[in-house]
Image: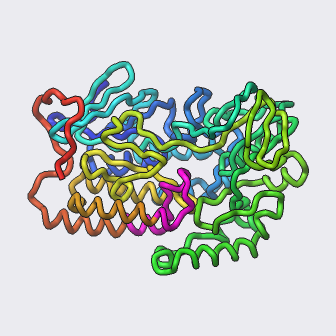
Amino acid sequence: MERLAPRGTLPVCVIGAGVSGLATAKYLHQAGIPFDCIDERDSVGGIWAYTERPGITCAWRTLNSNSPRGTYAYHDFPMPDHYADFPSGAEVCDYLNAYVDHFGFRDHIELGRRVERVEPRPDGTWDVTLDGGEARRYAAVVAANGHHHEPRYPDYAGDFTGEALHSQDYRHRERFLGKRVMVVGLGNSGSQIAVDVSHAAEHTLLSVRRGAWILPHLIRGKPYNRWLSPPPWWVYRFTPTRLLNTMVSLYVRLLLGPPDRYGLPKPDHRFGETIPTICEGIHDRIANGRLMVKPAVARIEDQRVTFADGTEEVVDAIIYCTGYHTTFPFLDRRIFAADENWIRLYKRAFLPDYPTLCFVGAFQAIGPSFVPVFEAQARLVVAYLSGEYALPSQEEMERDIARDLAMIERTFVRSPRNNYQVDTTVIIHDFEVELKRGRRRAARRRGGARPVPVVADEPEPADPLPAARSR
């Protein structure tokens, strides 16, 4: 491949061409920083790029976005007005492709290539190995590969002999025509797949371990965000969390009625303590008998499922909508690992021991759209890579990471689904404040080395795994 960097410099490697990777690529392009954006899919768009390939997470054929049009959009490139109020997966993918072409960085994107290994060098640069064995050297790496790659499964007693798959591989409801299907999980994927497959299956069960706050797309004829827009950041910062969540819970009950009115379990938490489930039609499918709610699974023998209440059902297929492990398979675990989805990064972006390895989009966000959060984080990362922004001391970063993890434990239900959760307005504000602070730090340090090394010499042989930066 022809190199995209000027002679005598090394580019940045962006891993992933989904929403967060594209935001990073666009800001790098505008900053004049050479980069390659690499994705194993055949199209830009991340999970919105439909594919039949197994093991690649993507939106199924009939999926519509849960984010209202106008919220799931980059700030300087609005979605077209003719899109649906809740755009289809194909519309979202078309929008992301149009974003790339509008800002003119498609030539920097390589599709159908998988990053196999990312290994650090003593000078802060990185060796990146692609599928097929091609090796490249980069000044810095931005991991924007998302968090929907490695499926998480429940550990049930017994063995199921029917058809089983994870939501990662769900594509067509017609595959389950005339079958008895059990969907496991009441998150966004579980509820939506249960509704979708119930239009084809003979009978659909939804196994629920914990209740959830469920929002329809429309409330009294308006998109749900018109009634439940996130408050300003200072409301979160200065209002006790339990008081705020209690008030919002009462408001949602007045707006929609009790969450357990439709035969679903009552939530064991306040609104805002976990990501709400957004699903159109689930209450209707339950009410007309096309979808039966069941408690958690106790045991499975062959195709007979025994539930926690002692009832039994025979099913032909199980669809596990039980989430994902956040993984970075191209990184050695000694460099970084997000066990149980704990993201131990400064501002969810920077790894103190490896300052030229950055992350964008490694979190879940409470709010109608992740896109503004991804943009704000991408701006921060690119400001750092350009030398406009400087990090604080390693000790200060470690203290901030500890405070962030403690906040999560105080605020959200303890679960891998929530361990990397953020409130959109709070973290966007934090990114903006941090960018200003980092610019002041950079101004004080002006004249020092750039954060990202510009390398013109021939590379030295790489160590298998250099020691982290000393503390």
Residue 305 visible here: yes
Q: Is residue 101 visible?
A: no
Q: Is residue 183 left or right of residue 106?
A: right
Magenta stretch containing residue 253, yes or no?
no
32 sits to left or right of 359: left
Residue at horizontal 64%, vertical 70%? 228
Specify the quadrant of the image occupied by residue 244: bottom right
Left or right, residue 432 beside residue 243: left
- For the point 72% across and 49% down, which residue is it? 191
- 426 part of magenta stretch: yes
* Percent x, y of residue 336: 34, 43
Task: Tell me how many marks there are.
Answer: 0
The x and y percentages for residue 199 are 83, 40
Q: Nearer the viewer, residue 195 or 440?
A: 195
Q: Is the residue 55 above or below the residue 98 in the image?
A: above
Residue at the farthest top position: 132
Quadrant of the image containing the N terminus: top left
Which contiguous range is marked in magenta? 408-431
x%, y% of residue 104? 40, 43
Q: Image quadrant of residue 129?
A: top left
Q: How is the image coloured?
A: rainbow
Q: Can you name the residue that lies furthest to the right here?
A: 288
- Residue ID at (59%, 27%): 54
**Residue at x 15%, y 27% (from the top left corner):** 461
Give the image location of residue 304, x and y in percent.
81, 33
